[in-house]
C-alpha cells in the first residue's frame, strides 16, 4: 500500500503532466523505489491504481528501465559497464576481482546485503573505461585496487 507521502508525490507528478498520465509512470515508480529501495509486485498494482492504468501497463515500463529495480537490492547498487570499450579495458578483471574479494556475482546481492552488482549497457564514460555507477556516482579508470578503495567507503 502506498503511503500518504508516496501518494502525494505521485499526484504531484500526475499534475505536472496533466492529461498525459502515462508520462508520470517512470517518476511514480522512482518515488516508490526512492522510499522502499525497489518496486514490488504489490507496489506495481498500487502505482497503476493511483495513475488509473493497468498493472500490465505499469509493469511494461518498470521492466523496460534498468534502473527500476524489480527485486530487492542491497544498500548500494553497483552498475558495472559492460560495453565493448569497458570489455577491452578490463571489465573481466574487475568482475573476477569482485567475485574473489567481495563475493559479488552479476545480478546478485552480497550475503551481507551491502551491494547488488548489475551490468549496464553503457555509461558514456568510454574515455575512462572501465567504468561503473555506484549509488548514482560515476567512476572511471577502474582497477581492482581503485575498486577496493571506492567500495571500502560504502559501509
Image (tube, helix red, strand yellow):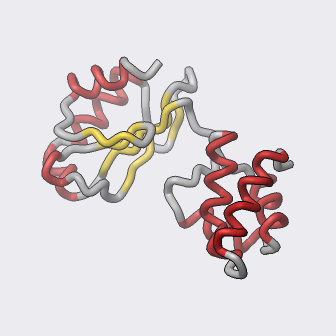
Residue 34 image offset from top left, x and y in percent = 62, 44
Q: Name the outermost residue toward the bottom.
A: 19
- The picture quadrant where one finds residue 90 is top left
Q: Residue at x 21, y 58 (%)?
A: 84
Residue 22 image offset from top left, x and y in percent = 67, 75
Q: Residue at x 48, y 38 (%)?
A: 77
- The picture quadrant where one finds residue 80 is top left
Q: Is residue 106 left or right of residue 20?
A: left
* Camera-nearest residue between 120 and 140: 140
Residue 5 image offset from top left, x and y in percent = 78, 45
Q: Residue at x 17, y 38 (%)?
A: 141
Q: Is residue 20 left or right of residue 108?
A: right
Residue 65 image offset from top left, x and y in percent = 52, 62
Q: Residue at x 69, y 40 (%)?
A: 36
* Camera-nearest residue between 53 and 60: 53
- The picture quadrant where one finds residue 75 is top right
Q: Is residue 34 left or right of residue 76?
A: right
Residue 114 lies, with reference to residue 124, above or below; the image says above
Count the marks: how many? 0
* Camera-nearest residue between 31 and 38: 31
* Camera-nearest residue between 23 and 115: 23
Residue 100 lies, with reference to residue 16, above or below; the image says above
Amino acid at each position: 500500500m502506498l503511503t500518504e507521502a508516496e501518494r502525494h508525490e505521485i499526484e504531484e507528478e500526475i499534475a505536472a503532466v496533466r492529461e498525459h498520465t502515462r508520462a508520470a509512470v517512470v517518476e511514480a515508480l522512482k518515488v516508490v523505489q526512492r522510499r522502499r529501495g525497489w518496486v514490488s509486485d504489490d507496489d506495481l498494482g498500487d502505482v497503476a491504481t493511483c495513475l488509473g492504468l493497468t498493472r500490465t501497463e505499469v509493469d511494461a515500463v518498470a521492466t523496460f528501465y534498468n534502473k527500476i529495480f524489480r527485486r530487492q537490492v542491497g544498500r548500494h547498487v553497483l552498475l558495472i559497464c559492460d560495453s565493448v570499450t569497458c570489455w577491452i579495458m578490463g571489465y573481466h578483471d574487475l568482475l573476477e576481482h569482485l567475485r574473489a574479494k567481495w563475493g559479488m556475482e552479476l545480478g546478485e546481492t552480497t550475503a551481507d546485503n551491502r551491494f547488488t552488482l548489475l551490468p549496464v549497457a553503457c555509461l558514456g564514460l568510454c574515455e575512462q573505461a572501465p567504468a561503473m555507477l555506484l549509488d548514482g556516482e560515476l567512476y572511471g579508470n577502474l582497477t581492482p585496487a581503485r575498486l577496493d578503495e571506492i567500495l571500502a567507503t560504502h559501509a
